Image (spheres, coloured by chain):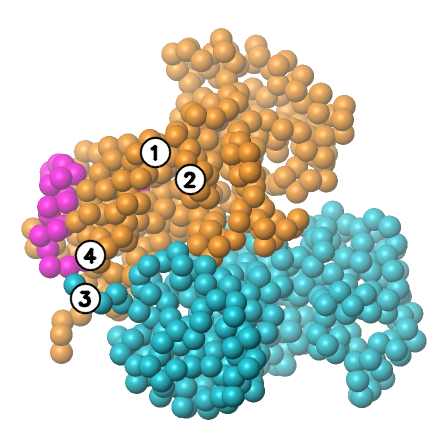
Chain colours: A orange, B cyan
Amino acid sequence: MAPARQVLVAVIGAGGVGKCFLSQLEFLAKKRPSPKLVLSYICTSKKAVYNDDYSDVGLSSDVLSTLASSSKAPLSLPKLLDYLVKSDSKAVLIDNTSSQDVADAYPMFLARGISVVTPNKKAFSGSRQLWIDIFNVSGAYPGAGHVFHESSVGAGLPVISTLKDLVQTGDEVTKIEGVFSGTMSFLFNSFAPTSGSGGKWSEEVKKAKELGYTEPDPRDDLNGLDVARKLTILGRLAGLPIESPTSFPVQSLIPKELESVASGDEFLQKLPEFDSQMEEIKTAAEKEGKVVRFVGSIDMATKEVKVGLEKFDRSHPIAGLKGSNNMISFYTKRYGDSPLIIQGAGAGGEVTAMGVTSDLLKVLAQI
Amino acid sequence: MAPARQVLVAVIGAGGVGKCFLSQLEFLAKKRPSPKLVLSYICTSKKAVYNDDYSDVGLSSDVLSTLASSSKAPLSLPKLLDYLVKSDSKAVLIDNTSSQDVADAYPMFLARGISVVTPNKKAFSGSRQLWIDIFNVSGAYPGAGHVFHESSVGAGLPVISTLKDLVQTGDEVTKIEGVFSGTMSFLFNSFAPTSGSGGKWSEEVKKAKELGYTEPDPRDDLNGLDVARKLTILGRLAGLPIESPTSFPVQSLIPKELESVASGDEFLQKLPEFDSQMEEIKTAAEKEGKVVRFVGSIDMATKEVKVGLEKFDRSHPIAGLKGSNNMISFYTKRYGDSPLIIQGAGAGGEVTAMGVTSDLLKVLAQI
């Protein structure tokens, strides 16, 4: 009998998503006897664990302590690629970082047969050239690696796979719109609820930060770039040649005066001085019987992509979203006036890792 | 250079879904140079078109007229299997019927390496033994065929694939609930709208039939079996050993007295005599400020599966559904209180065919 086929898994990143992914990978490895999943490499930005014979580095929760006490430095990306290519087994790179450097290396990995699975938005929402370089290689010829990135939009929600299915089966997408940021969703559901009056803007931002719903510096959410990156990905998948996430209008919710203050803490401290601006926007919407929400939309006919505040009737599904939920609507020729809608948590370690793990399953089915 | 790889496609059924699928298959064949898709066999219950050399029977709209004027009878299922197996190419069987006979043959096709793609619910919602026979073979060993059936629940909506991803990545599904029938959705959205008073029950049923939203005999929708079959499929995928779609409570909306009348026409003629029964149900809900909807649910903890009428607040997302839309909510451990929700048209030729075509793409990626 031939030895059981094995697939090497190399993981970069062991933060919130990375840790959840490791426990899902362990579940997978226990449940699926073939191919055997071997965690051959794992690293953070400082440390790494791997063996020259590619043997498992400990696919269980204690790999994190092994990693913490490791004296090995991470391999450079070209060396990691060499390490994986030199084995006799197929390998998958899991990029659980948000690093541009790792993203820039995808074409090199794919070209040498290493598949890539990642929640990292950088590769798909950065320069259009990188996008082209990646998809010119991914699955393009026998032996090329495959790339999957479901969790780059809406975490584990089936957003990317659904859009791909629509496009690949010949449907015509006419419009994509929705709430793409769990942070923005949480902020506006509290600041401008459909019933009741909501809190002060600066206080809601502070609360969101305390609950861990924002980036360490909340301006990284409030500048709208995260949503712009997600729209760039969806627009490109739908067929628009979007140059970059800054090549279309993106409304920033950072007051001009606070754009260059030194730290997130200083920003939060000064934000109350600008509460009246957001209050005005809320009141203007209320006068029309509406609520304000931070949304993104892509109009395929006019090729218009935009990100920013819009007013919605209180009965509109987007107005009624709860918590930090995302809601993405696909308007297409086949679905007519009733869009295909996907809704649910669009952030969080477990659900983001789920998108990574289900993408890994897709790779395993294909290699 | 090796000759371009080809995959044979054999299609059973050329009705509403079948016709839409053929046009999507043509789109696919034009767009994807490799593997080359060859429509080698197509049949209705009466006629068939195929060539001994497996050459394309005309992957364009005129294959339907070729089929209509063909003098060949369909091959029996064992003979179709032999025909496909004897070629040098991989082959996929597309079952666009709702036939139990074709469904019963899936294990035989899968065991000999022919993959199966279908919107036909019969194989997955009938006897538990057939389910077991199918999934004991599908993808179980190198050379076995794969089976995909996205359109058996919610047409092209990503319901099956999402549930599979949740389960396979180790999430714990706690509850599945929703509106699973486009017909029932249309009927209750008109009969008991969230605003206004709605029409008489018998008139809404008549209208739905005229619009083509019901089966030829509307009792085939009103008996609840279609929804019960869909819940059987989802429950089994989630891990419940459901014996059959009649092994749990299913509320039928056919008045006892009309169960055995000879025809759908006679049923529609006599239905107005029973309008007061449905009116009572509607009024009782209205007194609580609610509306009535026909829903299905699976509680994984109690293993309770049920199908029937339930009352919902007017502000509940299920109450606010429009047209013939479906809405399926997955409650899981990871998603907590905010379920993962998928919503949109759950019936119609084009969107059902889309589920079939995207499943075919999944097969092509794996064989």
Circles 4 and 3: CB atoms closer than 8 Å: no
Q: Quadrant of the C terminus of chain B?
A: bottom left
Q: Are marks 1 and 2 on the same chain?
A: yes
| Tag 2: amino acid | Arg
Which residue is the site of mark 4?
A143
| Secondary structure beneath label 3 | loop
Task: Tell me the tag on residue B2.
Answer: 3
Q: Is residue B70 above or below residue A243?
A: below
The CA distance from mark 4 to mark 3 is 16 Å
Q: Tell which subunit mark 1 falls on.
A: A
* Chain of the residue under the numbered disc 2 shown in the image: A
Residue A257 can be seen, yes or no: yes
Amino acid type indicated by mark 3: Ala
Between residue B19 and residue B66, name the one nearer to us.
B66
Per the image, the residue denoted by label 1 is A128
The stretch of residues the image draws in magenta is A71-98
Secondary structure type for disc 1: helix
Mark 1 Cα-neighbour bin, 10 Å: few <14, some 14–19, many ≥20: some
Helix, strand or loop at label 2? It is: helix
Asked if the residue under mark 2 is in contact with the one under mark 1, i.e. CB atoms within 8 Å, the reply is yes
Residue name at image x 42 percent, y 25 percent: A246
In whole angstroms, how far apart are the C-alphas of marks 3 and 1? 34 Å
Compared to residue B74, the image places residue B217 above or below, namely: above
The residue that mark 2 highlights is A236
